Amino acid sequence: MPDAGGARRAAEAVCILVHAHPDFSKGGGETAAYREFLTLRAAGRQAVIVAAADLAGFDAPVVAHAPGEHLYSIAGMTEDRLSWADIANRRALVGFLAELPVQVFHVHHLWRVGLDLMAELMEARPDARFVATLHEMLPICAHHGQMIRTRGRELCRAAAPTQCAACFPERPAAHFVLRRAAFLGVLRRFDAVIYPSAFVQQRFRDWGLRPAMDLVLENYLGDALAQFPRRRTADPALAGSFAFFGQPTPFKGLDVLVRGFAMALAGSSWLSLSVFGCEREDVVRMFPEVVPALDQAGTAINFFGRYDQAEVLDLMQTVGWVVVPSIWWENSPVVIQEAKRAGTPLVVSDIGGMAEKVRPGVDGLHFKRGSAHHLARVLEEAAGAETFERLVRSLGDSVACETFLAGLDACFGAACPVKEPWGD
């Protein structure tokens, strides 16, 4: 007799629901979600992606974007983008999602999706399986999920209503009690939760989230980058060449890097720093205090502005090291995965997912978070030819496609490749 369970699994399809589309926003969460969509379809799986967007000028709450891709308007959401002020818009989106021929809803982020929408969708589709990937700590921390104090740069190690109220004095402690209850009330209804790092998994467990199933699964880079030829041998001429990839947000530590590099340059004049993702004026606008360090470094620091994501591994192989100087916990920075795939060792802050993903002395080197002086010493150590060559040889790789799909299957309920085409 045919395996009824196997037949059911073969028909399973996945809807990926995410807070943004990478055609309009280049953040790590939306990029990871879209790469999952492409990977599932390339593997013969049924998958559709539905992403939030600013759809000004469109009357419909959901519009087609590309085959298997849809955008929904966030115009009816509350200011904090955690729920819907326009109930009619929310119900229209729930109706669209509930009618999709899928058995699994995989949600990346709850921001710009909505706690209320998820609760209503779960009621509308009790037959479906619900999985969440938590890329950051927004449910735990109202400060953009960064777990950094709003005054100064002090790290927060555990959320508590009184501490949260100290960061947001305009809100009473009771607000944060209710906020935690609202998030936990929805998150506990998910069948599985995926964490991109063991660090963030432990943070959520300590906070009180114990779903029926949780799994640490690194985000996959996608087939195109995964097939990129890695650097296997070190060019000693690149040992003193460092690079930053990303945006100049207040938490990315670019100011720490500029000051630390200028200090290292004073004793090692052959060093160079390439900054990809922003221009000099962007850094000065956000961190005016680094102007003296920029002037001191002169032409040793070069800014290359925004870059094409498809070229990132090529760019990483033009330098010796990738530096990730973030001052927040960084659960699983995609730049670390990209650098590993390129074969480029890393210098990272010694906290959170950065410390977890970069094994000191194997994948790269650590420096004390926020310390420009310690970073300067580590950069000088990294510039040594012997250190550089050794780490290029020992550097690990990012997650393989087979491992990634197996992890998804465990959470989705062992969804299998389809044998018939699926209409978009």
Image (cartoon, rainbow, N blue to C red):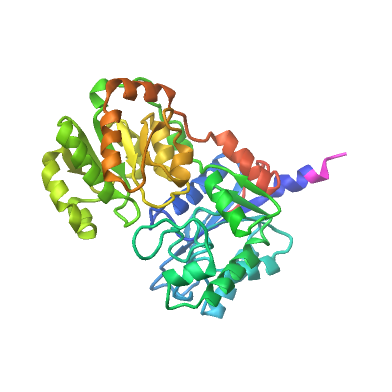
**Residue 386 horizontal/vertical position (percent):** 31, 20
- Residue 41 appearing in the image: no
Relative side of 312 to 79, left or right = left
Q: Position of residue 118 (x, y in %)?
A: 61, 66
Q: Compared with residue 77, is residue 288 higher up or lower down, i.e. above or below? A: above
Image quadrant containing the N terminus: top right
Residue 323: say if magenta: no
Inspect the magenta stretch and tell me whether residue 4 lies in it.
Answer: yes
- Dividing the picture into quarters, in which one does residue 375 lie? top left
- Give the main secondary structure, helix, strand or loop, of the magenta stretch: loop
> Which one is nearer the viewer's eye here, 411 or 87?
411
Of residues 148 and 104, the one nearer the viewer is: 148
Image spot of residue 320 (x, y percent): 29, 30
Magenta span of residues: 1-5
Q: Residue at x 82, y 41 (%)?
A: 3
Q: Say which quadrant the C terminus sits in.
A: bottom right
Q: Is residue 279 above or below residue 217?
A: below
In the current view of this chain or complex, which residue is farthest to the right?
A: 1
Counting every numbered tag in the picture gives: 0
Q: Nearer the viewer, residue 221 or 253?
A: 253
Residue 243 locus on image (x, y percent): 28, 38
Most foreground residue, 1 or 244: 244
Q: Which residue corresponds to the image point at 58% horizontal and 68% vertical from the top-left?
A: 180
Q: Is residue 152 left or right of residue 146?
A: left
**Any part of residue 76 in sight:** yes
